[in-house]
Image: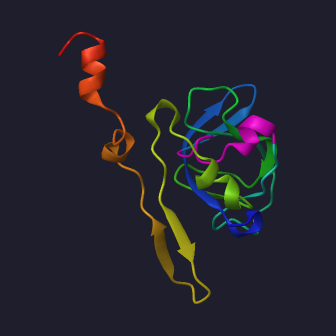
Amino acid sequence: MLAPYGCLVTKAIHEKHIYKEYIGVDACASNLMRPAIYGAYHHITVAGKEDAPCDHKYDVTGSLCENSDKFAIDRMLPKIDMGDYLIIHDTGAHGFSMGYQYNGKLRSAELLLKEDGSVQMIRRAETIKDYYATFDFCDALKKLNLK
């Protein structure tokens, strides 16, 4: 999937008002690493507020504990309320294929938006079973002499 044909849809779940305004979302760098690693710009739309004035300055932060887990820094956006959905554009091949499971964060499902407006799941979300599928517990216990 090429860059202009992918979006990461995430939900605003936290806010912090100190010397800056922060919006925390339920996605993180493991879903889209380019902004955290390279400082890459990805346009962000707040669903349902496409025509609202972009008169609030936010850092949009991910859900990991790392200070570089940010999707946007000092970005002018419409007022974001908890529960709003943010659409991070142009993610394409930089989403799932570059994703990882840092801190046990499981990969999200992938959905295909078809021309007729219908949606089809093309990759299910990972489960804990998937996460541990290649881990050999017996071998690990032997190495720890725990049998």
Q: Nearer the viewer, residue 98 or 135?
A: 135
Q: Main secondary structure of the magenta part?
A: loop
Q: Position of residue 127 (x, y in %)?
A: 35, 48
Q: Position of residue 66 (x, y in %)?
A: 62, 26
Residue 59 visible in the snapshot? no
Reply yes or no: does residue 36 show up in magenta.
yes
Q: Nearer the viewer, residue 131 or 147?
A: 147
Q: Position of residue 43 (x, y in %)?
A: 78, 57
- Quadrant location, the C terminus: top left
Residue 90 visible in the snapshot? yes
Q: Which residues are magenta?
A: 26-39
Reply yes or no: does residue 21 show up in magenta.
no
Q: Position of residue 83 (x, y in %)?
A: 52, 53
Q: How is the image coloured?
A: rainbow
The image quarter in which residue 86 lies: bottom right
Q: Residue at x 30, y 31 (%)?
A: 136
- Quadrant location, the N terminus: bottom right
